[in-house]
Structure formats: C-alpha cells, structure tokens
Image: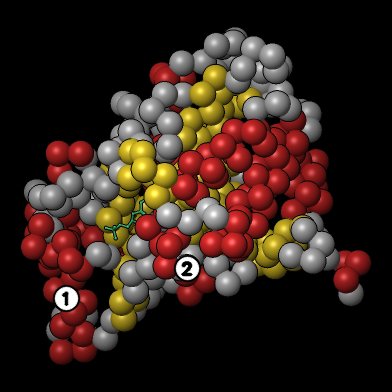
Amino acid sequence: MHNNRTTITQFIIEEQRQIQGATGDFTSLLNDIVTACKVISNLVNHGALVGVLGSAETDNVQGEVQKKLDVISNEVFIQSNEWAGHLAAMASEEMDEIYPIPQKYPRGKYLLLFDPLDGSSNIDVNVSVGTIFSILRCPEGVQNPTVEHFLQPGTQQVCAGYALYGPSSMMVLTTGRGVNGFTLDQNIGEFILSHPNLKISADTQEFAINMSNMRFWEPPIRRYMDECLEGNTGPRGKDFNMRWIASMVAEVHRILARGGVFMYPIDNKNKDKGGRLRLLYEANPMSFIIEQAGGMSTTGRERIMEIVPKSLHQRVPVILGSKNEVERMISYHLAEQ
Ligand code: F6P
Ligand code: MN
C-alpha cells in the first residue's frame, strides 16, 4: 500500500507530461518551492525551540511590523528559488521592490510572487499560518523584468498554491486542471497526495469575516451579514455558523474542505488603501484555487482574477467561497447601484 502513494514530485511530473512542449523547467521550479515550504514548515513546527518567534522590529512596505519568521521565511524562499535558472525575478509581501535574479545565476522564463508567511499574527500564539504563491510567465523576450511585467491579471497565472502549517502541514496546488492537496509525511520528508480533486460545495451555512469591523461595512455586506445572523427567523430561513482564524490560508483551506465563505470587504476603515488583502500574492492565487475547485471569488463588483493590477502591493476587497453565497453577495452589490 505504501508503495502506491503519489508524492508531489511524481504528481507534478505526471501533470507535466500532459502539457505539450513542457521542458521540465516548471516541474523543477515547483520542486524548489516545495523545498522552501518544507523548510518553513520545519521552522514553524519548532517555534520557540529554534528562536524564531517574536518581532523582527522592522516594518514591511505595508507598514506592518514584521515577525522574525516573516523575514526568515522570505529569505528561505529567495534562497531556494534564485539559483536554479527557472525564474527571471521574484516579488514578495515582505520586499518593497521586486527581486531580480542575481547576475551570477541563469535567468528563466517564470516570475514568482509570494506571501512567505501569511497570517503571521498567529505565530506567537501557535495557531495555523501558511505560505501563498503565484507563478506567472515572464513576457517573451524580457531578460530584465521590471515591476510592470508582474502586473498581469490573475487569469494569466500558470500555477497557484499554498502551504498550510497546521496540525499537519499541507500543500494545495492548481495549474488550471483542478485542485489537489498533499499532506507532509514528516518521517520521509515528502508531500503525499491526500486530497485529490478538491471541490467546494455550492451551498454553505458558514461564514468568515472580522466582525469587529462591522460598523465600517458597506450596505451590501451589512445586508448579507444581517440576514445570516437572523438565521432561521430571517429571510434565509436557516442558521449560520461563524469562524475567524485571521489566517487566510487556514480560512481558504477550511472552505475547500467543507464549504463556506470568506470575506475581507472594502470598508470605511480600509477604503483609502483599496481593501485589506493584497491582489498579486494573496487574492489572485487564492481566487485561482477557489475557482478551480468550483467556487467563486469577487470584490463584490468584479471578478478578482480579471483585475488589471496597477501596482505590486495593490490591495483588493475579497469575497470568496461557495458559489451560491458569493453570487448572492454579488447580487446585493448590484442592487445597491
Ligand atoms: O495577510 C493578511 C491576513 O493576515 C490574512 O491572512 C487574514 O485573513 C487577515 O490578514 C486577518 O486580518 P485581521 O487582522 O483583520 O483579523
Ligand atoms: Mn498575508
């Protein structure tokens, strides 16, 4: 039985065989990303024992205080992915500017965007965190990519994925042919296919939103939430359950596992910034995964993956998850206009 287990490497190689003209570059790039996530998983697991908890006493470009593990995970990602010759440049939540591949290494045809440690406010309290990544093609003929080469809509993503460092470490991936989940077997150091072809139920009675922002919400979100909270005495005629982990990776993972909706909408508090979550390395990769699993992802007013990005660290409102609930929220936004 154990010989029949599919490792993530085997899975990726078999996927690549279906793609005409694939050279093995992409497989190799994904392998390096997987290695980086295994290293981060190991650091997260050991926590205080290896001195990685606490603040780094620096701010990132978003003005957020960086945790030691934010900074370390960013370095791990760079070191794992800069040398092999598959990438032309990288960009991360933790770096103001893009990171061109140093001249001493060969340059490749892909661009890598990542949030090395999402939900990092959870680190010091030993709650789930994750890594999110998105792979784009570097435009043909571009040797020295600049920021504008990264400003591609989410529909152009070649691959998106996340690693969740929870009770078990998992990797969830899409290359546009469905969504598959792998669980890290710590004993052999391999991610093993454990959740093939993940699908999100169209209906749900579970929502995730930071309720402390209620007084800042716009009318469509207020309406949706009021109706959920009225439960079986209101227009929805059924009771809802709530979860808020403050870690988008864990939230999206729960939705893949048992349905639900996750919202970080635009509100009067984050309006000036355009929302809370970042388009290129949080919202787009998660939207690709959600859509590939049969769910939907929108700002309330437009499909997230069709937004043409204007800047590297651009923020967007996010509403994603079970199709029928997301469609309902879109209809509430339309009704407001
Ligand atoms: O990186 C953004 C993030 O940490 C998400 O993972 C999470 O969903 C959200 O911020 C939590 O926001 P808040 O601090 O408002 O609960
Ligand atoms: Mn994040």
Give how far across and how far down residue 100 sits, in percent: 55, 19
Judge the density around disc 2: few (<14), some (14-19), many (≥20) Cα neighbours within 10 Å.
Answer: some
Q: Is residue 123 above or below residue 25?
A: below
Q: Nearer the viewer, residue 159 or 215?
A: 215
Q: Residue 251, can we see it?
A: no
Q: Along the horizontal axis of the image, is 273 left or right of 244?
A: left
- Seen as rendered, the residue at the extreme bottom is 233
Q: Tag 2: residue type?
A: Asn
For marks 1 and 2 on the same chain, the one whose residue lies earlier in the sequence: 2
Question: Residue 325 sits in which quadrant?
Answer: bottom left
Could you say which disc has been placed on residue 141 in the image?
Answer: none
Please give the name of the residue rendered at 13% of the width and 50% of the height, measured from the top-left corner: 269
In which quarter of the view is residue 307 placed? top left
Q: Position of residue 128 (x, y in %)?
A: 48, 65
**Residue visible at 52% across and 71% down in the picture:** 257
Q: Which mark is residue 126?
A: 2
Residue matched to label 1 = 227
> Left of 55 or right of it: where is 273?
left
Q: Can you give x and y, in whole percent of width and height, for residue 298 in the image?
A: 32, 50
Identify which amino acid the numbered label 1 is placed on: Glu
Residue at 48% from the left image edge and 30% from the top image edge:
91
Residue 331 pos. (x, y %): 21, 58
